[in-house]
Amino acid sequence: MGSLETNDKIQRLMKIAEGWFIISEEDQQLYFSDLRFGLMSVDAKGENFAFKYQLTNEQGDLEILETPRSVGDAKNLLSALWDRIWGN
């Protein structure tokens, strides 16, 4: 995480997530994921967390953008959870 760890915005996210977070890199872009609310799928290898933020550092100013979620993600998750409940 390097110099981002001391950034006020990152410190705020870390506090909100109560220490339950990961920082990941995808296509040379950093993401902050709050682990408390889990994945948007039942696939244990999934990487699409319910609350995931893109971290961009342009001109020395850190910008934090929430990654968009779609209604389809929620429908798929609820459908999969319903199947698990019924043992399918």
Image (cartoon, rainbow, N blue to C red):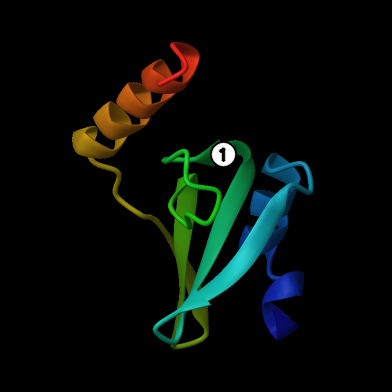
The amino acid type, in three-letter code, at marker 1 is: Gly
- Above or below 24: residue 27: below
**Quick one: 64 or 72, which is closer to the camera?**
72
Furthest residue in direction top, as rendered: 86
- Above or below 60: residue 81: above
Looking at the image, residue 2 sits to the left or right of residue 78; the answer is right
Q: Secondary structure at mark 1?
A: strand
| Residue at x 66%, y 60% (from the top left corner) | 22
Estimate the x, y position of residue 68 in percent, counting from the top left: 29, 49
Q: How many marks?
A: 1
| Residue at x 55%, y 49% (from the top left corner) | 44
Estimate the x, y position of residue 31 in percent, counting from the top left: 51, 67
**Quick one: 38 or 20, which is closer to the camera?**
38
The residue that disc 1 covers is: 38
Looking at the image, residue 34 sits to the left or right of residue 65; the answer is right
Which quarter of the rendered picture does the C terminus lie within? Answer: top left
Looking at the image, residue 22 sits to the left or right of residue 40; the answer is right
| Residue at x 20%, y 36% (from the top left corner) | 72
Check disc 1: other Cα within 10 Å, few if <14, some if 14-19, many if 20+.
Answer: some
Estimate the x, y position of residue 86 in percent, counting from the top left: 43, 11
| Residue at x 31%, y 31% (from the top left corner) | 74
- Above or below 82: residue 62: below
Which quarter of the rendered picture does the N terminus lie within? Answer: bottom right
